[in-house]
Image: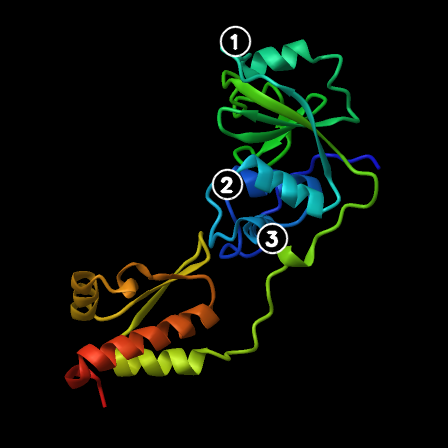
Amino acid sequence: MKIKINPVNNGTKKTDRNRFCGPAVISSITKMTTAEAARLIRHFTGERKVTGTHTHDLISSFNACGVKVQWVYDLNTLNKPTLAGWLKQTIKERTADRVFLVIAGNHFQLVQGRRYVCGITRSIVSIKDKKVKRRSRVETVYELTASDKITIPEQARKPKRIADQHRPFINKMKAKYGFEVDYEKWSETYWVFMPQDAEDLAWDMGHHLRDEHGCYDLSEVASRFDAMVEFMEENFPQKIAA
């Protein structure tokens, strides 16, 4: 099956997207949104957010979509060519029906013939576009192919939460104990905190809650609140609101 590069799909919701290059190249090939691509990568990494992607996790994500990632050559030598040099050397190889994943300048980018796309350009541009980092050094090149239809795995889909299942409990605990919850849109992370005196005590005690502030979804927020409630009741019973 012939594959081609597409513009990076950020989706329609500004709160549900990712700006890094790993999700961007997956999005370009599969047409899934960058948020879906980030969720797929997290399925393999186990991390709560994607700010950088290891090559093996990117390959695993592509494979899950039915995209084969075949090593072409490795340029990890003292004389690594620049991206401009590699493009010049591979004029005959870079036909319109071949898609290359190029790692250069610690950055993933896709090249198809004279067309280029990455997490910086977002749209398809010429390989001579000023946004293309042509002086970056090429380290590794892969070719992407697909024998069957490219699919979007369920692991990439946004999980459907039971409507407001955890919100009543979270709101009640915020009012009763003075807990705070802040949502960071770009990383899709909920940051939770106890009142400052409780945070200070947790730090002084070396309690595990001193470093446990990030949560991936509301169910995790509710679970973290349970531990925070226990801490408050043990150490600040006199400050608990009625």
Q: Mark 1 or mark 3, which is nearer the start of the sequence?
A: 3
Question: Mark 3 Cα within 10 Å, few/some/many (few <14, many 20+)?
Answer: many
> Dividing the picture into quarters, in which one does residue 1 lie?
top right
Per the image, label 3 sits on a secondary structure element best described as: helix
How far separated are the C-alphas under marks 2 and 3?
Answer: 13 Å
* Residue occupying the point 41% across, 74% down: 222
Using the numbered discs, state the Cα–Cα distance from disc 3 to disc 1 in whole angstroms.
37 Å
Asked if 109 appears above or below 178 in the picture, the reply is above
User: Could you tell me the amino acid type at mark 2?
Assistant: Phe
25 left or right of 238?
A: right
Identify the residue at horizontal 37%, vertical 80% (top origin): 171
User: Which residue is at a point 49% across and 57% down the rendered structure image?
Assistant: 15
Is 77 rendered above or below residue 146? above
The residue where tag 2 is placed is 20
Question: By what rule are the colours in the image chosen?
Answer: rainbow
Could you say which is closer to the camera, residue 190 or residue 125?
A: 190
Helix, strand or loop at label 1? It is: loop
Cβ–Cβ under 8 Å for marks 2 and 1: no
Which residue extends farthest bottom? Answer: 242
Q: Residue at x 76, y 26 (%)?
A: 98
> Alpha carbon of mark 2 to alpha carbon of mark 1: how far?
28 Å
Q: Position of residue 215 (x, y in %)?
A: 41, 63
In the picture, the disc for residue 36 is: 3
The residue where tag 1 is placed is 79
